[in-house]
Amino acid sequence: MWQNISITEFILLGLTQDPTKKKMVFVIFFIFYVGTMIGNLLIIVTIKFSRTLQSPMYYFLFYLSLADSCFSTTTAPRLLVDSLSTKKVITYNECMTQVFALHLFGGMEIFVLILMAADRYVAICKPLHYPSIMRQQVCTILIILAWIGAFIHSITQIILALRMPFCGPNLIDHYCCDLQPLLKLACMDKYMINLLMVSNSGALCSSSFVILMISYIVILHSLRNHSAEGRKKALSTCTSHIIVVILFFGPCIFIYTRPPTTFPIDKMVAVFYTIGTPFLNPFIYTLRNAEVKNAMRKLWHITTTSESKG
């Protein structure tokens, strides 16, 4: 049974209350959000229409960029609107929707990163079996399972949020709705629900990070048996993946694997993995990947050639 609530709306305090700084926040994060959408949509379109990017690695990168775009959209637009508003009100239902979407697309990103690591492990450690193991049908099933896993994770989080009773105050010292800032306002014993939150989000982040780092250590160790050119190419790809993993999981572990306490740095840490990481991912994957850059150039050339003929 859901808890009855006496609060129908919350007020998001955002990143700052200073009018001048709020304008700076709008400009900075507008650039970040536009860059995130352009960068990730460019990768999505390039992979979709490029014949040279049809391998499983790029199939998973397609969904990582999709998850990044959606993940950033759950928080960035409201942050931008609230930075120009005097009263940053979010209804209870909108708040719960944001919690659900945040964990759905965040969970999807985690599972896709695991799939990308598994793909690299098979490609580098078992190259002869790679075509038979990573077939298109298998990749499709894995992505479906990733969506199911993300949905189950998000459902468990929203159940925890819906069971929190709120009787006042309604000021959320954050720029978005999430379990940690909501737990601070809940009129209840916070120990058990925080334990459930840590055992869900905290365990998911920590265990996934450990699995990913172990897998990349095994992959890097196995590169000793490859040629110099093969090592260079595999090392470049794996380095990009490792950078993304550290940038995403570091803040997640900091936020979700601790007692129900809040720190002044929490909001900036949350900004980094909800807005900063989706912004950086396209640069990390394209700047270090010659195949993606070449595919983008070809797509741009085809587009401009078609326009000039038209």
Image (tube, helix red, strand yellow):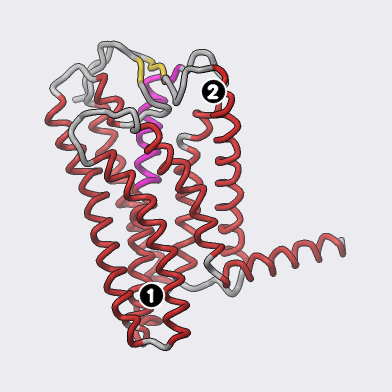
Name which residue lies at 36% across and 14% down.
8
Mark 2 and mark 1: Cα distance apart in space: 48 Å
Q: Is residue 216 left or right of residue 288?
A: left
Residue 41: horizontal and vertical position, in percent?
58, 52
Q: Residues within 10 Å of mark 1 (few under 14, many from 20)?
A: some
Does the segment drawn in magenta span residue 70?
Answer: no
Which SS does the magenta portion mostly show? helix
Q: Label 2 belongs to which residue?
A: 22
- Image location of residue 304, percent across then percent down: 79, 62
Residue position for label 1: 134
In front of the other: 171 or 8: 171
Dot 2: element: helix
Element on which disc 1 rests: loop
Q: Is residue 203 above or below residue 302?
A: above
Q: Report the amino acid beneath label 2.
A: Lys
Residue 209 in the image: state x and y as whole percent: 27, 56
Q: Amino acid at mark 1?
A: Met
Which region shows up in magenta? Answer: 89-106
Q: Nearer the viewer, residue 137 or 102?
A: 102
